[in-house]
Image (cartoon, rainbow, N blue to C red):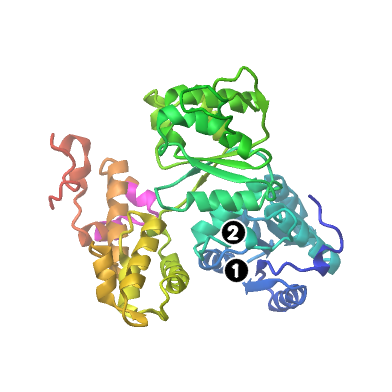
Amino acid sequence: MNATPDAAKDPPGARLLVVDDDADMLRLLSMRLTGAGYQVTAVTSAESALTQLEIEHPQLVLSDVRLPGRDGLQLFDEIRKRHPTLPVILLTAHGTIPDAVEATARGVFTYLTKPYDARELLDKIAQALALGSPAPSGGKVGDESWRAEIVSRSNRMAEVLAEARMVAKSDASVLLRGDSGAGKELLARAIHRASARADKPFVGVNCGAIPEALLESELFGHVKGAFTDAVANHKGLFQQADGGTLLLDEIGDMPPALQVKLLRVLQEHAVRPVGSTQSIAVDVRIISATHRDLDAAMEAGQFREDLYYRLNVVTLHLPPLSARREDIPLLANHFLHRLSSKYGKRLSGFAPEALKALTTAPWPGNVRQLFNVVEQVCALSSSPLIPLALVQRALRSPSVEVQTYAEAKQRFEREYLVGLLKLTDGNVADAARLADRNRTEFYRLLQKHGLTPGHFKSDAASPGGDPVAEGRRP
């Protein structure tokens, strides 16, 4: 999809990360892009850019090729590893054009030569944003209404949402993976709203919640007289979702006999109601969701391989709530605002200790559990500020310990050294080489953590297992 030259006249307010070590050029770029309506973060090095990527999630990176230390091409390679869908535009001098051309072949959206044309720059940015973040049906690039139900400021969720928005413009089948309560149905609805099918029905069914004897009729429909209780014709969910999107939640729980029939529907784009001899054409986009390991289910013969590949054209993984703790205060206050009106209470927020308890809780039930906890404290609170005691009562489980920076660093360092020694069979010279440290310094690190290289040699390991893994110290 190509943006028109006038695309920049209606700026979407997208977030851009601009990288250039020339302070004057950086200032000029920032002013020009801010004036065009973009939100600009400016940094002077690749390292600063990578740090900024962990703080916020820009929708495009504009970088000079010549940078101190790690150059723009190396920056692009690192961005591609961490954020494969994030578009990158390079600014290059004539001397580095061959490198820029090679980078374009590797995935850089485009490059512009200095001095660049301002209009061309704005047009290329608009095109990259349109390609990377297509607008929902009938909307504009930058319109976030399609994902309004998903409350998040997590970089991991931002990556998932960016991929979801890209896949929404196609009709490819999507498989959503993630723990129960992580928000798979909300994401499926968001994909539907961002698609060309947004004005058609969205229908969802939990394949594990309906008895096997009824699931076929529920999905494909039935005709009058097909069975004892079939007193009238019934449209199945495929027909109800015609033209729109059908979410098959917990697809991993679908009985094997129905998997065969579902595969036939996906192949023929038609359903045959129970008791009927006629097939009915349907046009449905399929989104599946599961918390089960379908690969293991296939190996165990519990899930058909051919159906798996029909459903798993694109896979999106939703992170558990414990992996996006920065979202917990945001979600908790969002739910509090919604529920306070439901219970007719004027609730202003959580006490600091209560919010800390929420943030550090383990959350095995993910966002759904958080909502239930907030609803409980809303119902029981007798004061505008939710106290710690109510939150602890609702959680009914101890909070996880948050490590200090020093503790986390110490733990990582020890685990890293143990991994190297296992990899090199206790050979200090090889381990030091892999760590890019001299042997003297490496020995000091081993002594600091009480690690003895000899315990990692294959012939020194006891039949019972690895001494470090068992907790024995040298």
Q: Residues within 10 Å of mark 1 (few under 14, many from 20)?
A: many
Task: Choose top left, top right, bottom left or bottom right for residue 424.
Answer: top left
Query: In the orientation shown, which residue stands out farthest toward the front?
Result: 231
Q: Is residue 3 above or below residue 299?
A: below
Residue 15, image x, y percentages: 65, 67
The residue tagged 1 is 45
Q: Is residue 3 magenta?
A: no
Task: Choose top left, top right, bottom left or bottom right for residue 59.
Answer: bottom right
Q: Earlier in the sequence, mark 1 or mark 2?
A: 1
Q: Residues within 10 Å of mark 2 (few under 14, many from 20)?
A: many
Q: Residue at x 60, y 23 (%)?
A: 272
Seen from the viewer's position, the closer of residues 193 and 90 is 193
The residue tagged 2 is 147
Q: Nearer the viewer, mark 1 or mark 2?
A: 2
Seen from the viewer's position, the closer of residues 289 and 359 is 289
Give the distance between the C-alpha atoms of the residues marked 1 and 2, in whole angstroms: 33 Å
Q: Residue at x 32, y 76 (%)?
A: 381
Q: Amino acid at mark 1?
A: Ser
Q: Is residue 313 visible?
A: no
Q: Is residue 46 above or below residue 135?
A: below
Seen from the viewer's position, the closer of residues 468 and 69 is 468
Task: Answer left or right for 238 relative to 361.
Answer: right
Q: Which residues are magenta?
A: 431-444
Residue 114, image x, y percentages: 80, 65
**Disc 1 secondary structure class:** loop
Task: Answer left or right for 343 relative to 238.
Answer: left
Q: Is residue 441 magenta?
A: yes
